[in-house]
Image (cartoon, rainbow, N blue to C red):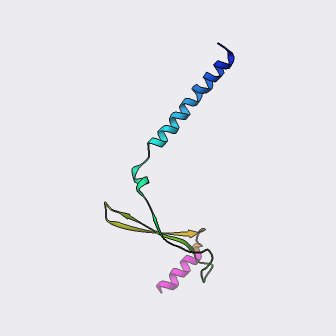
Amino acid sequence: MKMEDLMIGQRWLLSVPRILLLLSSVVVVDVRTMAQVWTVLAVDPKDDGRDPSLADAAQLSYRYEKDQDLLWFRVSLYGKPNEESRREHCRRYWN
């Protein structure tokens, strides 16, 4: 047996666990994760709000859970909202 053949065999043996790990991660997928499909209702352009200190909405989506008869809504934002301005806006809104 040649040295090159031995090296190819060793490389193959070392890659087998990686291949098995990849296959197992592809096969073991939570069905609930695959079933969460969000439908986009609206898309909003960036930086179009009146007050730039408030959160800027990017997308409005919904998802229906048939088993529990629940309708979920999700608002996606551009960037991270400013916590202080959110508190001030809520305080002004509720007072």
Q: Position of residue 23 (x, y in %)?
A: 49, 38
Q: Position of residue 72 (x, y in %)?
A: 40, 67
**Would you place residue 6 above or below residue 79 in this image?**
above
Q: Position of residue 77 (x, y in %)?
A: 56, 70
User: Which image quadrant is residue 4 in?
Assistant: top right
* Viewer-proximal residue among 61 and 68: 61
* Viewer-proximal residue among 26 and 53: 26
**Would you place residue 35 above or below residue 90 in this image?**
above
Q: Main secondary structure of the magenta part?
A: helix
The residue at the point 31 percent across, 62 percent down is: 68
The residue at the point 65 percent across, 21 percent down is: 7
Seen as rendered, the residue at the extreme bottom is 95
Is 94 a magenta residue? yes
**Would you place residue 88 above or below residue 66 in this image?**
below
Instruction: Tell me where the magenta segment starts and ends, as one range.
Output: 84-95
The residue at the point 54 percent across, 34 percent down is: 19
Is 4 a magenta residue? no
Q: Position of residue 73 (x, y in %)?
A: 43, 69
The residue at the point 44 percent across, 43 percent down is: 28
Report the label total.
0
Seen as rendered, the residue at the extreme right is 3
User: Which image quadrant is residue 80 in?
Assistant: bottom right
Quarter of the image containing the N terminus? top right
User: Horizontal placement of 62 versus 51: left or right?
Assistant: left
